[in-house]
Every structure is written in structure tokens, then in C-alpha cells.
Image (cartoon, grey):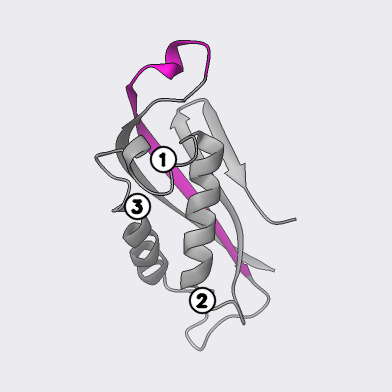
Amino acid sequence: MFELVVYTHFSSAHNLRGYQGKCEELHGHNWKVGVKLGSETLDHLGMVIDFKIIKQKLNEIIQQLDHKYLNHTPPFNDINPSSENIAFYIYQELKKKIDKSRIKLIKVTVWESDDSSASYSEK
């Protein structure tokens, strides 16, 4: 299988409802997002997908989160904006935007710091 990975970044604030500790308070992160895609075949240009296209689709989702207070941004107004839930949300939204007949969305990873990340994949 061919695989590719793209990265992007966004900044936002959030707090974790019901959490006992500092993260219950309003705080911010400079998030890093990594998306892994795969395909058994390449397109007529010899690519899984053009990096420009997948970055555009990913950034359509990220724009909804960038410089926002996530607790007031759907769907996080109803669920905790944890790293895990953010990874799941980006995965679900990006899955709607890709050609699933040839390309598989393998995994979305979200880093809230250089050494802390959460991922979502369907396995």
C-alpha cells in the first residue's frame, strides 16, 4: 500500500469540563495535526492524491477550529474538546471529503504539545 502524510497547524483555546486539574481552566494550544492516507493504486499522475488537494480539504476543516474557543464551537459545545475528540472530529469530517473508492483515510493524529498526542483510526 502507498501511504502519504500531511501536516497542518492551528491555534485554539479550550477547557475540559469536569476535569480535576489545570486543564479544567481555560487554556490554549498550538495544535499540530497529522493525516495519513493510503491507496493500493496511484492515479494517472503517479500519486495517491495531490498534496495540495488533501491540504486544501484538511484546511477547510481546520479553519472551523483555528483561533476559536473550542467549547463554543460545534461539536465541542456538546462534547469535551479533548485531543482524542478533536482527532475523531477531524477524521470524520475529512473522511466525508475524500474519494473513498480509491483512497483510505488511515489515521488522524493531533498533538497538543511536542510530546503529547492522540490519534483516531478505524481498525
Alpha carbons under labels 3 and 2: distance apart? 24 Å
Does dot 1 land on a helix, a strand or a loop? strand
Does dot 2 land on a helix, a strand or a loop? loop
Q: Are marks 3 and 2 in contact (CB under 8 Å)?
A: no
Kindly identify which residue carries mark 1.
32
Residue type highlighted by circle 2: Met
Residue furthest out toward the bottom: 44
Q: Residues within 10 Å of mark 1 (few under 14, many from 20)?
A: some
Q: Are marks 3 and 1 in contact (CB under 8 Å)?
A: no
Q: Residues within 10 Å of mark 2 (few under 14, many from 20)?
A: some
Residue type highlighted by circle 1: Lys
In the image shown, does 76 or 55 lie closer to the viewer?
76
**Residue visible at 44% across and 11% down?**
22
Q: Which residues are magenta?
A: 19-38
Does dot 3 land on a helix, a strand or a loop? helix
Residue 53 percent across, percent down from the top left: 38, 71
The secondary structure that dominates the magenta segment is strand
In the image shown, does 25 or 119 lie closer to the viewer?
25
Kindly identify which residue carries mark 3.
62
Residue 93 percent across, percent down from the top left: 47, 61
Residue furthest out toward the right: 123
Compared to residue 84, the image places residue 114 above or below, namely above
Reading the chain from its start, which is encountered first: label 3 or label 1? 1
Foreground mark, 3 or 1? 3
**Residue visible at 33% across and 22% down?**
27
Kindly identify which residue carries mark 2.
47
Residue 1 percent across, percent down from the top left: 70, 69
Which image quarter is the C terminus in?
A: bottom right
